[in-house]
Structure formats: structure tokens, C-alpha cells
Image (spheres, rainbow, N blue to C red):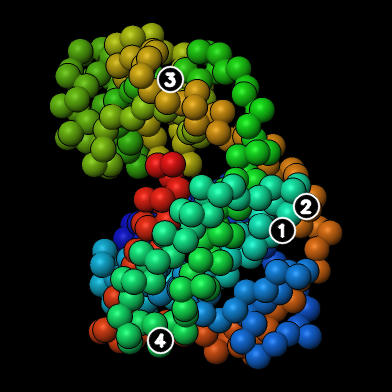
Amino acid sequence: MRRWMKKAAAFLCVFALLAGAAGCGKDFTVVLTTGLKKNEVFRIEKMSCTLPELMVYLTNLQNRYEAVYGEEIWGAKTEGTSLEEEAREQVLAELAQVKTMALLAGEREVTLDEKEEQRVTAAAAEYFGSLNETEVTALGVDEALIAQMYREYALAGKVYRQIVENVNPEISDDEARTITVLAIRMEDEADAQDVCRKAKEEGADFEALADQYSEDTAISYSFGKGEREEAIESAAFNLGKDEVSDVIEAQDGYYILKCISTFDEAQTQLNKEKIANQRRNEAFNREYDSFVNSLVRRLNEELWDSVEMIRDENVTTDSFFTVYNQYFQTA
């Protein structure tokens, strides 16, 4: 159950990243509770988020989720919080971030050009045209609102790209070096010492030992610096090719490692891009966080507390982000 819940929670991050935002679930706390219209969920300065907008996000997430895990997923709980509540909070945070980034675009005088506006119009027509009458009524949307949502989405992505376009960090091979090891994880230290002896002194086949003794299903791992617990990383990066480590005490047991590759070129190149993206996100977050701190945010708590997922077999829409990506991610 725990592993299943982790997979489900990770799905929220995938949903969040479809927007091309800086990171998964970047928190945005909305405060204050007065001066809002009946249908406003929240307002950030002059930027308003209405209930139909929130329902588009939430319903698309809900239907994509249920296609993978089924309707029963929403009753599952982790640390006392239902996955439905986590999904609601994720949607609120994502919408708040998009609205804030649209405001930041205005601050930086970032606008959509004529071709981008044409893509907004075409995407809105396609998505709205995919909705049946029940969905239009349940979501409370029209084509103009969908166009507004796509426009703000596009502005958010454009201002992000503008902020990070000159962030091109040089990443050395050593910094991004990725290695590959076979690993045996055991819970008993004495047993681990015995298996280590078999591998190092008796020359037993390491992969066969891993299949027989390891507590984990996976035995092969590729990783770079900073991606594993320090004790494991330190031992792994000091192994020569085909060398077997001593027993390593870690937080979740005792490990024995065998180095398969001290430099995985393909994975190292991928890790370089990963590190570069992290640094671009850091540059963006510095400006974004400074901007956020200057804003007044209001949440309509009564309306927010009343928000529920739509349970109607005729409401199956799940293509809001797919349509956006067709028009903007390939542009």
C-alpha cells in the first residue's frame, strides 16, 4: 500500500509539470479572506481565479488519475490526509503559481505575439469543442474562459523561459559523473558480512548473490553525486570497475556494492542537463520568490471549502493539458 501511495503521489507531480512550471508543487500560501466576489476562489493582486477555472484543473486531474488507479483511489490516505485533499491542494497551488507568473509577465512586459495568440485561440476552440453539454454545465465554462486560461498558461511559460534563457552553467564531467553499481541490501549485519565474504574472498557471482540475498527487487542502480545517501555514495564513487565494497551501514540496512561502470557517458550527459535545469530553476525561483513576497493574496475560504470533485459518468474530460502541449510545446 505504501509503495502504491507513493506512485499515486508522484502522479500529482507529473500533472503539475505539464504546465512547464519551475517545479513540482511549488508552494504558494494564499492568505486573507475578504473582498472577493461570490465565484472567486482566490485573488492575487488584480489576478482572479474563478471556480470554473479551478474545476477545469481539478476535473482533468481527477479523470487522468482515475484512468490509472480507478475511482477508489480518492479514499486512500497517507499520513492522515486523503489523496483527494492532496489533489485539491495541488490544484490550488498550481493555479496560484500560474496566476502569479502571469502577473510577473506583466511586470516584465512579456506578452504573447500574434502567432501565440492564434495558438491560444485554436487550442481553446479544440478543447472547448471536445466538451459535451454535461461537461460544459458541470464545469461552468465557455470558450472565452478556456482561451484566458491557455493565455495565462502560455504567459507563465514564456516569462519562465525569459528569466532562465541566459542561465547556461558549465557542468564538468566529474560533477555530473554517473556510475552504475550492483547492490545487495540486507537487514542483518552479520548476514551481510557473510555475503560480502562470499563475494570478495570466494569469488561468488555477485549478481547471483544479489538475486538470492538482497531485500530489494532491483539490484542495478545508476546515479550521480548527491543522489544517494552519503555513506553509499562515498563508497560507490571510490570503487574501481568490478571492485566489490565492504559492508556499508546505511539508514535502511546494510549494503554491498559492485562497480559495473565508473563512468556512464550517456547517463552523465543526461545528468549534466538535469543539473543545468536545476540551476535554471534556482535562478527563476530567486526572482519568483522575491516577486511573490510583494503580493496581496486573498482566499475565499467558504467557497474553497465547498469544492468537491465531480462524480458523473458523463464528465470524462482529461485533455486540457494535452491540447495545450500540442499547440505550445511543439511550437
With 181 as the anchor, is 286 left or right in this view?
right
The answer to whether residue 62 is above or below residue 313 is above
Between marks 3 and 2, how big is the CA–CA gap? 38 Å
* SS assignment at label 4: helix
* Image spot of residue 175 (x, y percent): 55, 18
Q: Are the residues tagged 2 and 1 within 8 Å (C-beta)?
A: yes
Q: Nearer the viewer, mark 3 or mark 2?
A: 2
Which disc number belongs to residue 141?
none
Q: Please name the residue that numbered disc 1 is placed on.
A: 103
* Image spot of residue 34 (x, y percent): 78, 85
Is 172 placed left or right of 214 in the picture?
A: right
Q: Secondary structure at mark 3?
A: helix
Question: Mark 2 or mark 4, which has the lower sequence index?
Answer: 2
Q: Which residue is mark 2?
A: 107
Considering the image in quadrants, where does the C terminus appear?
top left
Q: Of the residues shown, which amino acid type is indicated by label 4?
A: Ala
Instruction: Report, in whole angstroms, how far the alpha carbon at label 2 lies from the one at label 4.
Output: 35 Å
Q: Is residue 86 visible?
A: no
Q: Amino acid at mark 3?
A: Thr
Which numbered disc flags the more N-terminal residue, 3 or 2?
A: 2
Residue farthest along the top direction in this orientation: 240
Q: For the residue marked with disc 1, what is the amino acid?
A: Leu
